[in-house]
Image (tube, rainbow, N blue to C red):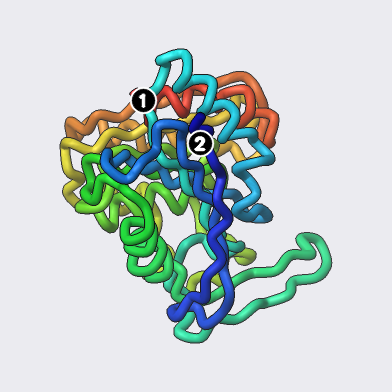
Amino acid sequence: MNRSKVKKVNFYSEILGKEMAMLVYLPESYNSSTPLPVLYFLHGRSGNEDIMFELNINKIADQMIKDGEIKPMIIVCPRIENSRGLNSSLICKEIHEYGHNNRIINLGMYEDYFVKEIIPMLDNTFNTIKDRKGRYIGGLSAGGYIALHSTFRHQYMFSKVGGHMPALELELEDEDKPYYENRDVWNKYNPILIARNNNISCDIEIYLDAGEKDEGRFYEGCLILHKILQDKGINSRNHIFPGNHSADYIKSNLEKYLKYYGS
């Protein structure tokens, strides 16, 4: 009897120059003859690929597929580190910030790593639908920000995107500056400004949501982005659900997200 699997894929990133990893969920129906759509689901600032297990994504997907609520799909949780998914430095490096944040900031060519390394590797290794119609991307918090700018900057790659309590900041703050050499770089990756200043393909579906008590007030950025997209005739939906900026918020809405991607 076939069962779903979660495979750990360890690999050396030539672009970043170091060992990286991702977790890949293969549904029970996965086989070598029927290509499946792929959802890339990105962790937040302090997370990693283990978000797959922390949110029970694989178990919830199993049940929803079994119940016919979603179609079978491959789900990939790659390690993005605390990078914001940017091409921020030609040389991959860590900056240790002590004090209030006490965090590690990861600089490097993370946009290229995701678009030019992760996705081709996944398509070459597993039986995927190898075009944008069968490729979706979503993420939580910083991962939602990455999902949105990745889609808007590479519209030929994805047909659905979800920003779940996405870190849509309205101003460039001092603590953001390690990532961005100058305001032009910040503008280049800002999903709100990309949507405002560029054409967005009308066949991309967009899902935004944030908690009504989100400490970052990211529901404000979601509303601004949603309005821009609606005015351009883009299929965007925006939700404010109960909750704050937390893993519990994501867990309480995960079935809604999977239904969006897998319907």
* Residue 46 or residue 14, whichever sits in front: 14
Q: Position of residue 29 (x, y in %)?
A: 40, 32
**In the displayed image of the protein, which residue is found farthest to the front?**
1
| Residue located beneath label 1 in the image | 71
x then y, percent, for residue 202? 16, 37
Taking the spot 64% from the left edge, 69% from the top edge, the residue there is: 105
Q: Quadrant of the C terminus?
A: top left
Q: What residue is at 26 percent from the left and 57 percent from the top?
A: 154
Q: Is residue 4 left or right of residue 15?
A: right
The answer to whether the residues at label 1 and label 2 have Cβ atoms under 8 Å apart is no
Q: Position of residue 250 (x, y in %)?
A: 61, 31
At a point 43% along the width and 47% down the height, the residue shown is: 40
Q: Is residue 263 above or below residue 197?
A: above
Residue at 47% across, 62% down? 85
Which kind of residue does numbered mark 2 sit on? His
Question: Farthest residue toward the right?
Answer: 99
The circle drawn on residue 164 is: 2
* Front tag of 1 and 2: 1
What is the three-letter code of the residue carrying label 1?
Answer: Lys
